[in-house]
Image (tube, grey):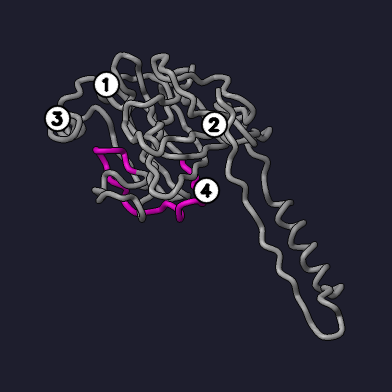
């Protein structure tokens, strides 16, 4: 995979000038700044690491923070947009190609009933998503797998329907509320799939609660966007898929727990 340089986060330094101290910070100011830095460092949990409690509960990492082991491009397509760098899973996207037929990233493993967590942030006007129960029978992952939508709700250059907004079960269930953080900030997503019962959580709020394969679900499929996609939502087991929709997006802390 091509190594990509992520944008650096720059901190601005402020100079405090006053008569008699030549712009030097007082001891009190120094202590205050030092304590604040220590507290911040102490509260930041390391990324892409499972705690002992999580391991005992059956959680497993899908992204190790170092490379793309455990992942591959859907149906062996060519792609140089994905990389692992600085502990982040990064998709550089494209400035010109915003199609939904690009090189999506697929987990090697398949899952049936599971709880999944992931942290993500997206570039301004960005669009991406996480798909699950994906098979490789079709030209694109969305033709089989339901999608948890990740998008810049506020600044996307086209009008969004409610079922296109962050946290939605794309084209099936709109989020009950808009819970995404401002673009550029990290969001925390939790997805539960258990015998067709699906929950989408965004930043601690449950935004979708639905049941697959019921008469109501079938009607929504047959009268909406998926009416011509016979394989959509059919599989009971499949891959996890991260979408390259031409937008820059970052992921970390990708972990999953299989449910019995």
Q: CA distance from mark 2 to mark 4?
A: 16 Å
Under tag 2, what secondary structure? strand
Under tag 4, what secondary structure? loop
Which residue is rendered at x = 16% and y = 25% of the image?
A: 228
Circle nearer the N terminus (1, 4): 4
Under tag 3, what secondary structure? helix
Q: For mark 2, what is the residue?
A: 255
Which residue is rendered at x = 36% and y = 22% of the image?
A: 134
Circle nearer the N terminus (3, 1): 3
Q: Is 65 situated left or right of 37 in this image?
A: left
Q: Quadrant of residue 52?
A: top right
Q: Which residues are magenta?
A: 168-189
Task: Judge by depth and name the residue closer to the eye, 96 or 177.
Answer: 96
Which residue is rendered at x = 28% and y = 34% of the image?
A: 211
Disc 1 vs disc 4: which is toward the camera?
4
Circle nearer the N terminus (2, 4): 4
Question: Horizontal and vertical percent for residue 236?
Answer: 33, 20
Circle nearer the N terminus (3, 2): 3
Q: For mark 4, what is the residue?
A: 186
* Vertical position of residue 78 compared to residue 159: above or below: above
Q: Quadrant of residue 243?
A: top left
Task: Judge by depth and name the residue closer to the eye, 105 or 110.
Answer: 105
Question: Horizontal and vertical percent for residue 19?
Answer: 82, 85
């Amino acid at each position: 995979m091509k190594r990509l340089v992520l944008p650096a986060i720059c901190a601005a330094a402020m100079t405090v000038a006053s008569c008699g101290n030549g712009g030097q910070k007082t001891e009190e100011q120094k202590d205050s700044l030092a304590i604040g830095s220590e507290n911040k460092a102490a509260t930041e949990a390391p990324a892409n690491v499972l705690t002992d409690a999580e391991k005992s509960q059956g959680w497993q990492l899908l992204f190790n923070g170092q490379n793309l082991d455990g992942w591959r491009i859907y149906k062996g397509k060519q792609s140089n947009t994905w990389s692992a760098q600085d502990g982040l899973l990064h998709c550089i996207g494209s400035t010109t190609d915003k199609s939904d037929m690009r090189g999506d990233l697929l987990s090697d493993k398949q899952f049936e009933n599971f709880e999944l967590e992931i942290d993500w942030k997206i570039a301004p006007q960005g669009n991406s998503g996480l798909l699950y129960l994906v098979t490789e029978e079709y030209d694109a992952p969305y033709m089989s797998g339901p999608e948890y939508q990740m998008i810049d709700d506020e600044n996307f250059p086209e009008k969004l329907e409610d079922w296109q907004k962050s946290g939605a079960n794309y084209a099936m269930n709109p989020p009950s509320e808009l819970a995404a953080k401002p673009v550029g900030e990290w969001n925390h997503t939790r997805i539960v799939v258990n015998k067709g019962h699906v929950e989408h959580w965004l930043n601690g709020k449950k935004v979708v609660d639905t049941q697959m394969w019921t008469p109501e679900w079938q009607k929504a499929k047959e009268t909406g966007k998926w009416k011509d996609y016979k394989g959509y939502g059919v599989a009971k087991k499949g891959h996890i898929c991260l979408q390259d929709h031409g937008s820059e997006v970052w992921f970390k802390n990708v972990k999953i727990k299989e449910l019995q």
